[in-house]
Image: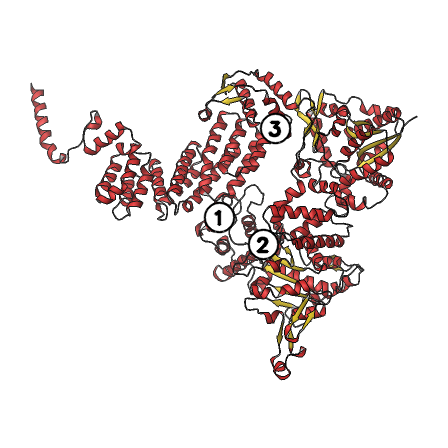
Amino acid sequence: MSEKLRLPAEDSFASELKALAAGEGHRPPGWALSPRQVVTYLMGGTAADGTAITPKYVGDKRLIETAVATLATDRALLLLGVPGTAKSWVSEHLAAGITGDSTLVIQCTAGTDENQIRYGWNYAQLLAHGPSREALVPTPLMRAMEGGKLCRFEELTRMGSDVQDTLITVLSEKMMPIPELNSAVYAQRGFNVIATANNRDKGVNELSSALKRRFNVVVLPLPDSAQQEVSIVVKRVGEMAQNLDLPAPKNVAEEVARVVAIFRELRSGSTEDGKVALKSPSGGLSTAEAIAVMVGGISQATFFNDGELTAETLASNMIGAVVKDPVQDTAVLGEYLETVLKKKRGFEGYYASLTDLI
Amino acid sequence: MAGDIHLFGIRHHGPGSARRLVQALDALKPVAVLIEGPSDASELLPMLADPDMVTPVALLTYAEDNPAHASFFPFADYSPEYQAACWAVRHGATLRFIDLPASDRLGSSASDIAEEIAARSEEDPVSRDPIGALATAAGYDDGESWWSDVIEENPATGPVFAAVADAMTALRAQEKPLSAREAAREAHMRIEIAKAAKECEGAVAVVCGAWHVPALAERRSLSTDRELLKGRPKAKIKATWAPWTAPRLARASGYGAGVVAPGWCAHLWETREGDRVALWLARVTRVLRDRGHFVSTASVIEAQRLGIALAALRERPSPGFEELREAAIACLCNGERAVWDDVAAELLIGAGVGSIPPSTPLAPLLDDLQRQQKATRLKPEALERALTLDLRSESGLMRSTLLHRLGVLDVPWGRLTDAGRSRGTFRENWQLRWEPEFAVRLVENLLYGSTIAEAAGGRLIEAMSKEAELGALASLVRNAMIADLPRATESGIAALETKAALTSDGQALLDALPPMADILRYGEARAGTVEHLAALMPRIVVQAAIALPYASRNLDGPAASKLRGAILAADTAIQLAQLEADIVARWREALTALLHDDQTTRLIAGTAARLLYEAELLAADHTADLLARMLSPGTPVAEAAGFFEGFFEGAGQRLIHDAALRSAVDGWLLALPDDAFTASLPLFRRVFSALDRNERRRLMDVLFGRGTGGAKGYRLVPDAGAVWPPHEARVLALLKVGAAQ
């Protein structure tokens, strides 16, 4: 038993990867599995020897196929989506499946600079011996290029646009010049880049179109069906409540179903039966936010309401998630309450408390 | 000597089938080509090769006594049947339809057909689209891709059709027995094939749905087949060609034998293997660029690479439209599905409209018109004639409906002379005049349906789907309702619902209310049902009520007076429509909110105050207080004047009769400083100019306390309380004296 809090994907699912790798199939250079086996690894199924492969991504198989095919054409892959759509999860598993190494990650932030993308210097070496390969400190990107592996960029759009553009040469010419040494690092076959980015957040740096053009973009959507989403929320809420030592109230599942139903209707701009069209609030209302509402509600119930999870406690949490723009979103929510929720059976509590709150 | 029979099992509207079939026919050189289609329409078949015939077109057969009872048999460029017919005409081969005659289907009673449709949907999807079923089983989105992957890869022509026949035999072995109609169809085809084989010397090509191949190849005695055909229904039918559209070839349009993506099928037919993918992506790029999206050539190259990689990943020989769709989304649309959806319809469905040669036999719409003219006893006359209709009588209603429907079809035989006023009444006045070109215009509508009612409905539905304005949409719905077109009315109301929900513009929502109230009232005068609308109108009222407070802020002059007009009209509409009390209350609450919100533009606040006052929700003394406050010296004159205008414009009469209101206004006016008064003079003129001379005089009179005769002239003197007791004493004394005498 490992003492690590969390193992990388290739270690947690080592047996599945091994079983898949035992199968036949044409592998692009540098790939541990064939593209088909990678798709099976992500979507679940059985390996050639009958080992069951658990699904890593629940959703549209076509998206994963597009992602894998993109990486097979040596084009870089950009996974876009609102928070909580499993972008990083998919990127980690793609890297684990394709090269067996998902640890070459660069977490991009506003403070990320070029040295963290290209290479840094070991200043002691630099001062002692002058510029040399030994004085270079390789970044995950550089190591991936040299080793023919996949490099992952998390939240690509959070770093400054000028820093992002460092990637342009790497992506189109598959090489990184080191002008200080008058040399360059050439990518080995199998090298590629998977980036994730959030397409809903404000305050991020737009990708320049030159860089965007070098990515094939796959947008990961929010869950398709209500059941799928409810089960994701119930599972995650359970895990998070456990982490926070919150006792889960009995009626969590029912309330999750209601909260998810409201979120889905507002987000999709129509009622679940498709009969009434609605306006959507300016916020994203992602699955992750539904989870946050539930956890907030449970915490409030535990500490202030004798552990009883009610519509009122959830409604006050929900307001924060729905109303991001005080004028516009209040009107949108008001309209939704009056035209839809008022008549919806089982939602009387939500209607009453939400109406009180706005 | 009997002819040599060759069966070609095809996929309806399958470009792969069509290409293979033409090759096979070129090789076989048959003397007769038999096609699965209504045998009593055979004489129309050679017209397909007419140079004026532009696909898509449909063979239209309809019952002579009831054109609504019709069936369509569409042909596209890439339909194997169309190619077979053209081939036969080009090569002078005998050309014939061999399926059960249309009179059989059209003669069946409605219940038989309903049964058959039910049975067919049960059989789904194997018998309807057997190749599609095989494709689905193999994990494909559409049969065409599977067909081209599996069949077109095969270099030899002969074995292709033999392989299809084998597959169908296997599929049919597991099916339950055929319905009586299906059995009769196959029996009829067998008989016809045998007949043709006897007549012709040489090869006979039979082009039929792949599904039927095993049954037609079977050897059965003619007498058993004849037995099957006994007692089949019959009806007098007419057949003609009708122009068709590409969207109606799509399965999504409800055409059972349709294809998923007619646009892709056409592309498959028009292009050859080598550059097909590049040409398709070039089309995608062109459409995207036309819509203002930036797409670079480098991205197109990447899209092609990704498409090919995806096809390889899915183990397909070449990319189908699914792979190219995903490649286009990832490379050309920046992953945004919405961008793709925006262009998908144009690319995958297409917008092509067919046309038919002028020599086509009589169109069913004219037929229908003649029948209806007879039924309503309206004769087309070239001279203008006035006609008054009473909608309460059945004949009046029928005539009015016919004229309204023709109006929808752009055949203005009748013109309503009092269009504005007739709504909600039982009388309509028409001017009738028939012009010869109306017949031509009517025939053009064949695209929308085979009867006047159907065509009018179809045309309105199309117009509704294109209409962007809520108010205009509502009046289209009104037209549909007047013309008694329930399907169009329903789809219009659905469109209205969607559009209303997505509109956050208070003005637009308010604008939709008056026509809707009209419809509700008019719907009562007619036999039509207005249930949906009755549910929709309250929703729009509620939405408007919610949107109103935000819509009324920070408006400039013209915008404010436009909104004011809309609010007044909407209020009238809400009262007319007699909505439920809580909806009206919601509306009034919104008005109250307007009044109490300091940010509301004053003109609108004044309007709201006036409506509330009229609804007696604002007590007279309250109103006087409110006016006094709004018009008090502390308020900037421009704001006060705005409120004043909002309250009084068009309601000057109130001032004459409402003393409390009058004195509040009077007080405000007198307290105005001179320059402010002068500045507001144009406003006052505007408000009071709505009164006529007489009314203005009466207002002056009440203000200056002059009696103008009648009870209204009396006025209480200021110190009546003090003066009255001595007067009373005098009067009583005089009366006493009188009584004593």
Query: What residue lies at 48% left-to-right and 39% top-to-bottom?
Result: B539
Judge from the rendering whether residue B382 lies leftward or rightward of residue B262; answer left or right.
left
Name which residue type carries label 3.
Ala
3 or 2: mark nearer the eye:
3
Look at mark 2 in the image and give the residue it sits on: A253
Residue B269: x, y in percent?
A: 75, 40
Q: Are marks 3 and 1 on the same chain?
A: no
**Spatial CA span between label 2 and label 1:** 27 Å
Say if B375 sits above or below B220 in the image.
Answer: above
Report the front residue among A191 and A128: A128
**Spatial CA span between label 3 and label 2:** 52 Å
Report the front residue among B482 and A273: B482
**Chain holding disc 1:** A
Judge from the rendering whether residue A103 lies leftward or rightward of residue B8; answer left or right.
left
Q: Secondary structure at mark 1?
A: helix
- Near mark 1 (Cα within 10 A), the count class, few <14, some 14-19 or many ≥20, is many
**Chain holding disc 2:** A
Q: Secondary structure at mark 3?
A: helix
Q: Secondary structure at mark 2?
A: helix
Residue B237: x, y in percent?
A: 71, 21
Q: Quick check: marks 3 and 1 in contact, CB under 8 Å? A: no
Residue A297: x, y in percent?
A: 51, 58
3 or 1: mark nearer the eye:
3
What mark, if any, has residue A332 been given in the picture?
1
